């Protein structure tokens, strides 16, 4: 428990202090966010805001993880695999952001290159992870899971990593929306991992592995909160693909490690809604030539309906919190179904 608190405290302070340093570094080099032309007119004023702020989140998390393990808590290979996935997804996002900035456009890596990078990370996670205790299955929650072959597991991991990372990326369209929703989601996973640590006898992970996941989740929660101090509207810095791809990839990785893969649909419910809104918009437009929403992702639809940006953000955070609460409820219900009420 102390290691979790240390990780959270260190990550929060590091992100609060480190984000302005990252902001100044990128501003001096002219790394300002280009705004897509087809976006809402109100976003034009945001052009030039420093981006790649996700760097601060990643560095704060890694520092917090290292400091937390200066105590008696041992580092686990599985924890390193999870943290490595987080960092590698950030590298892909950083490359995407850097190309956008160098080319002065809103398009970075092409889809093939980005998917190739994500596929390599998925392969490392899918084939290295099981050697260190990662469950190789398609799970809903707890023992509700299906064991699969290595090949199927890799394809499933690739879909999870790319789906989750791109979902967070789509959500990152309003100041603080993705950072706040990510903080809430990792708060949920901190509780799940800590519960598995306290009750490791009935879960696939051993106590040290579950504690490591709780430390990582708490560190990212706090890092997102510290970053949000500077990213809240009006944002002084954006997380960019560096942050969104890393956070989405880590969400998927933690969901796999905690055997709550399909439960991620609820815990990351806001990200799912944002992604589905884009899928619906594109599919309906291709078939009928008409739009379901004024603009997708769906947060832009409400912007164009006249909602204030802060109103959308807070209401979407509430929706994210409801999804996380439902996910935690199902997680606990599954545990009760197996173990029974605690006396």
Image (tube, rainbow, N blue to C red):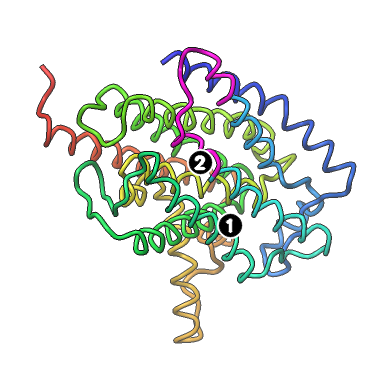
Residue 65's place in the image compared with 275, above or below, is: above
Q: Is residue 237 visible?
A: yes
Q: Is residue 334 left or right of residue 83?
A: left
* The magenta stretch spans residue 48: no
- Identity of the residue furthest to the front in this view: 131
Residue identified by numbered label 2? 182
Residue identified by numbered label 1? 303
Instruction: Please give the name of the residue rendered at 55% of the width and 26% of the height, measured from the top-left corner.
Output: 65
Image quadrant in which the N terminus is located: top left
Residue 71's place in the image compared with 164, above or below, is: above
Q: Is residue 330 left or right of residue 49?
A: left
Residue 70's place in the image compared with 321, above or below, is: above
Q: Residues within 10 Å of mark 2 (few under 14, many from 20)?
A: many
- Residue 60, by quadrant, is top right
> Measured from the top left, where is residue 168 in percent x and y?
53, 52
Q: Earlier in the sequence, mark 1 or mark 2?
A: 2
Residue 81's place in the image compared with 157, above or below, is: above
The residue range painted magenta reads: 65-84
Q: Nearer the viewer, residue 174 or 15?
A: 15
């Amino acid at each position: 428990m102390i290691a979790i608190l240390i990780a959270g405290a260190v990550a929060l302070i590091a992100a609060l202090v480190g984000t302005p340093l990252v902001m100044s570094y990128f501003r001096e080099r002219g790394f300002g966010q280009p705004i897509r032309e087809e976006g809402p007119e109100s976003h034009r004023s945001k052009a030039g805001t420093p981006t790649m702020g996700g760097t601060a989140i990643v560095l704060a998390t890694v520092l917090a993880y290292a400091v937390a393990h200066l105590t008696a808590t041992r580092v686990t290979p599985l924890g390193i695999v999870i943290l490595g996935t987080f960092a590698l997804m950030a590298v892909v996002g950083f490359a995407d952001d850097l190309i956008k900035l160098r080319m002065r456009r809103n398009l970075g890596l092409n889809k093939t290159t980005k998917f190739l990078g994500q596929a390599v990370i998925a392969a490392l996670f899918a084939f290295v992870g099981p050697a260190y205790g990662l469950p190789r299955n398609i799970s809903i929650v707890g023992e509700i899971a299906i064991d699969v072959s290595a090949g199927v597991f890799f394809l499933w991991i690739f879909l999870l990593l790319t789906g989750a990372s791109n979902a967070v990326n789509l959500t990152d369209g309003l100041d603080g929306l993705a950072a706040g929703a990510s903080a809430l989601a990792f708060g949920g996973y901190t509780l799940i991992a800590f519960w598995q640590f306290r009750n490791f006898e009935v879960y696939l992970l051993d106590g040290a592995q579950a504690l490591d996941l709780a430390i990582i989740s708490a560190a990212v929660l706090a890092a997102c909160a510290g970053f949000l101090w500077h990213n809240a509207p009006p944002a002084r810095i954006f997380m960019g693909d560096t942050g969104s791809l890393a956070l989405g990839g880590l969400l998927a990785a933690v969901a796999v490690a905690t055997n709550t893969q399909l439960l991620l649909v609820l815990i990351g419910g806001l990200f799912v809604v944002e992604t589905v809104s884009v899928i619906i918009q594109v599919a309906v437009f291709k078939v009928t030539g008409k739009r379901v929403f004024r603009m997708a992702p769906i947060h832009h639809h409400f912007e164009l309906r006249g909602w204030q940006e802060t109103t959308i953000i807070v209401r979407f955070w509430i929706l994210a919190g409801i999804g996380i609460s439902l996910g935690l409820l199902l997680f606990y219900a599954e545990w009760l179904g197996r173990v029974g009420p605690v006396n």
